[in-house]
Amino acid sequence: MSNGIYKVPLAVNEPVLNYAPGSAERVELKNALAAGRATIKDIPMYIGGKEIRTDKKKKLSPPHDHQHVLGYYHEGDASHVKQAIEAALAAKSAWASLEWEQRAAIFLKAADLLAGPYRPIINAATMLGQSKNAYQAEIDAACEMIDFLRFNVQYMHEIYNQQPVSSKGVWNRLEQRPWKVSCLPLTPFNFTAIAGNPPSSAAMMGNTIVWKPANSAIYAASVLMEVFMKAGLPAGVINLVFVSGPVAGDVIFKHPDFAGIHFTGSTEVFRSVWGEIGKNIAAYKSYPRIVGETGGKDFIVAHASADVDVVVTALSRGAFEFQGQKCSAASRAYIPASLWPEVKKGMLRDLQSMKMGPTENFENFINAVIDEKAFDKITSYIENAKNSKDVEIIAGGKFDKTKGYFIEPTILLANKPDYLTMCEEIFGPVLSIYVYDDNKFEETLDIVDRTGIYALTGAIIAQDRYVIDAAMKKLVNAAGNFYINDKCTGAVVGQPPFGGARGSGTNDKAGSMINLLRWVSPRTIKETFVPAVDYKYPFLNKD
Ligand code: NAD
């Protein structure tokens, strides 16, 4: 039992390294990439602190070079999910009763390992495994993950510090208990940090975890697991299994001890997961917490008063960085007719200068999309566009999967605002643009608000302050992260936390105190020093 009320180190955002030619970080990263390419990794599951290997080895390859073998992961089945639940339950009591500052120290150490010796390793894993360029890997796998770990420790401390008032003769206290049972993060391919945050944040609050990453992100997830263990995470606190989503779901969603899910992925899968949980609700010992961070159809609206260069840059970066595979990526834009010729010119100039190729060549801004399934889905939208009279392809439109899953950054000009690609999440380097009559700005805001099922991110680009105010009001429910004169991507932990509503999720803002509160169950304690000894109140006395 600690006899001190400890402060925690003040969290500050990890500085982003720039990897410019001649920099030390560039040399280190290139060495890590070469080492990653030269090694064939054997990646086990981790259950109860043990490395688990099976006879089902699955190949891992860079999306930009799908014939190259990075390594193999050991695929599990339902029996491994059951073992992982048992391991999590076995670890529960010791972990939940460990002093909070000991838990904090483990994750602060993990942050320092990622900021130091593991930085080139986690970035190289993300560049090779998920085809992110050096800068995109740095802001995600290194900086965002480090920020999640450090800021979450600070939020945990703030949460524990929030105590009720006490009246005379009474002491009211509040403690934040972890859930008695296991939590399941199902995590996506597109951000190493967004995959690493759900298991580590729920574990930090005292829970034990079964973590199932997306198959296409196992390479980086295994590095994070190595970091957590090196930081001193005890056996069984986070159990990492490699099974398909439905296999994990089938075991976990029927388990009476299932306590909560932090899902990050597509809206369609989340809806089916919620349905499964609903079907089993009577079987659970407690109502599970359901957190979902899901899809988006994120917008940029430019007003006639906008600075054209700001619009062009917001679109070029917002739509095409990481091949548009960010949940926040700009995928629909509304441009006033008066600005369109200049915006178009600027975008064509930008796209012409964007090089596409493997991540190991640092000159490439565009790399490959994650896998063949994604490639086929994204290119089907482009094929449809080629055959539609409602849309014109004004840039890109070519693709090739011979060596890697490469799709040119593509701009579609839709002649109606409800054309398919203006409404559906494509999750690739395809930006749809609708050009509106300058006099119809207000109507356009209404269209933005009611198009599609999502409400994740969006931006207004304008210089006129009345216009900004009008857009903020009309679009109040259209985005959980709203930007003014900026692209609609790039949320930073500790600054604006991230998440959306409507079809985009439960808006439990990853990277904030709001999110950590989902992984605890408060208990209030009231102690009365001199308790009443007679049930009768004075008002009961005769007049
Ligand atoms: P996905 O839905 O295909 O997979 C997410 C996770 O769910 C994976 O681990 C997957 O294996 C698992 N899964 C798949 N089917 C399942 C099932 N039937 N039962 C249980 N689990 C199942 O998503 P993805 O392709 O990995 O990621 C891209 C999606 O994630 C996009 O829609 C994107 O917008 C979204 N995303 C959202 C956020 C956010 O913060 N809102 C962040 C990142 C990604």
Image (cartoon, grey):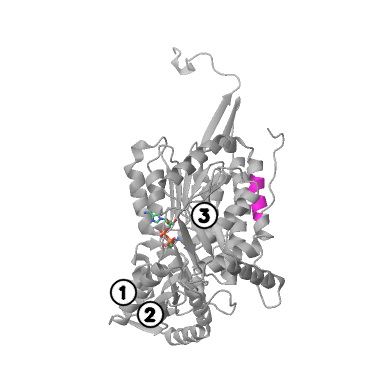
Whether residue 496 is visible = no
**Crowd rating for badge 2 (residues with CA inside 10 Å; few <14, some 14–19, many 20+):** many
Q: Are marks 2 and 1 in contact (CB under 8 Å)?
A: yes
Q: Which residue is mark 2?
A: 412
| Numbered disc 1: secondary structure | loop
Is 17 colored magenta in this rendering?
no
| Numbered disc 3: secondary structure | loop
Labels 3 and 1: the sequence-earlier one: 1
Residue appearing at x 60%, y 48% in the figure? 155
Labels 2 and 3: the sequence-earlier one: 2
Q: Quadrant of residue 146?
A: bottom right
- Residue 473's place in the image compared with 77, above or below, is below
Please give left or right for residue 67 compared with residue 16 in the image: left
Q: Which residues are magenta?
A: 104-111
Say which of 359 and 155 sits in front.
359
Judged from this view, the residue extending furthest toward the top is 542
Say which of 217 and 134 sits in front.
217
Q: Tell me which secondary structure the magenta stretch mostly adopts.
A: helix
- Residue 451's place in the image compared with 435, above or below, is above
Q: What is the distance, in whole Å, between disc 2 and disc 1 at their CAs?
A: 10 Å
Question: Residue 437: x and y, percent?
Answer: 36, 81
Q: Which residue is mark 3?
A: 510
Mark 1 within 8 Å of ligand 1, using the beta carbon: no
Judged from this view, the residue extending furthest toward the front is 55
Question: Residue 1: x and y, percent?
Answer: 68, 32
Q: Quadrant of residue 12?
A: bottom right
Q: What is the distance, in whole Å, between disc 3 and disc 1 at their CAs?
A: 32 Å
Mark 3 within 8 Å of ligand 1, using the beta carbon: yes
The type of residue carrying mark 3 is Ala
The type of residue carrying mark 2 is Leu
Residue 419's mark? 1
